[in-house]
Image (cartoon, rainbow, N blue to C red):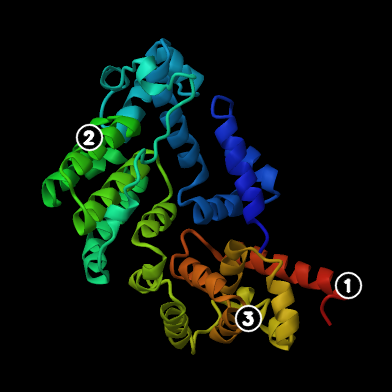
Amino acid sequence: MHYTESLQETILFINENLTADIALKALADRTNFSPYHFHRLFKAFAGEVPMEYVRRHRIISAARDLSADKSTVMEIAFKYRFESQDGFCRAFKKYFGVTPGEYRKLNRRITSSRTSKNGEARLNMFDINVYKDLICSREEKSEVLGTMDKILELSERASKFGLFSLEADINDVQPDFFKKSIQMLVDGVEPEYIRKILLNYAFCSGYKGKELLTRVIILEGITAIQQGVNPVIIREMLSSYFGEDYSEELQKHFGLDAESQQQKIESYLAKIHEKQIYSKETALLEEPLSRLDNRSLQRLLREIDICTLADAISGSGGTIQTRVLRNISIRSAISLIDELENPGTCNILNIVNSQKKILETLVSLRNQGDII
C-alpha cells in the first residue's frame, strides 16, 4: 500500500503552485491513479477532497497577500485563479467570516512589529518557558479532555463547512477565554494576532496547572483550525501538551490503543460473518484469494492501496473480507473498515475494476516468483 509518498509529493506540488492552473486529472496523473481513486485516496490522506484542499489553501494564501502587500482585491482574486472578484469575496467570507476588504482592515501590519532587529521573522511559538507551569495531576488532565474534544469537534466542522459555521458555538463554551477565541476566529483575525492576544490573557492572569493547560489547548487548537490544519494533526499536536506519561490515557480516550482497535476489528468481523457476495459479477476474488496461504496473501495486500482494496472486497463475501482483515496490520484494518463502512459512490463497475486490478497484481507477483 505504498501510496503515501506520492500523495505527499502531490500536496507539496499543490502548495508550491497555488497560482497556477490545477486540475483534478492532472493531479491524478502525477500519482498514476485514476481520478476516481486519486480523489478517494487524497481525501483519506488529507481529510478533504483535492480541489477543496486547493481552494482552501488558495484562500489562505490570498489572506496573507491581503495583509502583506498592496495588490487590489481583484488582482489577488485573479492571481489565485478565481473567475471573478465576487466569487472570490463569497468564498473568502465563507471561510473567514468577513470580506477580503474587512480582513485587510483587521490585519494591517506594522512591519517593524513582526520582525526582529536582524530582519528575521519572530517565532510564533511560546517566547517564555511556560512548560513547568503546565504540570498538573492526571485527574486534572482528564478534566481538560472535554475541552480538547470540543476543539476537535470544531476542527471537523470547520473543515467541512468553513470557519463561519463555528459562530453558533460562541455562547455554548467555557471559559470566556474559549468564547473570545472563537469570536476572533470567525471575525477573521489572523492566527498570529489571535495567538498574541490569547497569550496575553493566559499569562497576565497568572494561570497555572489545569487552568493554564486548558487555555493552551484552546490557543493552539484555535490557531491550528484557523490555519486549516488537518484534525488528526491537531489531535496529535494538542496531545503533546499532556506529556508522554499521559499518552496511554489519550490513546484509550480516542480509541487508538491496541485493545480498542482490536475490539473494533472483532466487532466488524462478527457483523460480516455471514455476509454474501454482492452479486455474481463481484465474485472474482472468492476463489483466487481463498487458495492463497497467509504469506502469499500478505505479500499481495502490500501492493494494494486501501481505497482499491475497499472497493474490491466491498463486493466480496464475509469469508474473503475476514481473511483480508486478518492479514493486514491493525492500523490498515481500521482504515479499511472505515472505508467499508462509508462506501461513498462505489458501484458494481468500480468493484469489478478494483477486483480485476488485484488479480492483475496477483498474476504479476506470481510471474515474478513472489507468490506461489
Query: Which residue is found at the position 36% from the left and 69% from the top?
Result: 246
User: Which x, y percent locates residue 19?
Assistant: 55, 24
Q: Is residue 283 left or right of residue 207?
A: right
Query: Which residue is found at the position 42% from the left and 29% from the top?
Result: 122
Which element carries disc 3, helix, strand or loop? loop
Contact, mark 3 vs mark 2 (Cβ under 8 Å): no
Residue identified by numbered label 3: 327
Label 3 crowding class (10 Å Cα cut-off): few <14, some 14-19, many 20+? Answer: some
Please identify the quadrant where the C terminus is shown.
bottom right
Q: Is residue 65 left or right of residue 90?
A: right
Residue identified by numbered label 1: 367
Query: Which residue is found at the position 53% from the left and 54% from the top?
Result: 45
Which element carries disc 2, helix, strand or loop? helix
Give residue 94's quadrant in the image: top left
Identify residue type, mark 3.
Asn
Q: CA distance from mark 1 to mark 2?
A: 61 Å
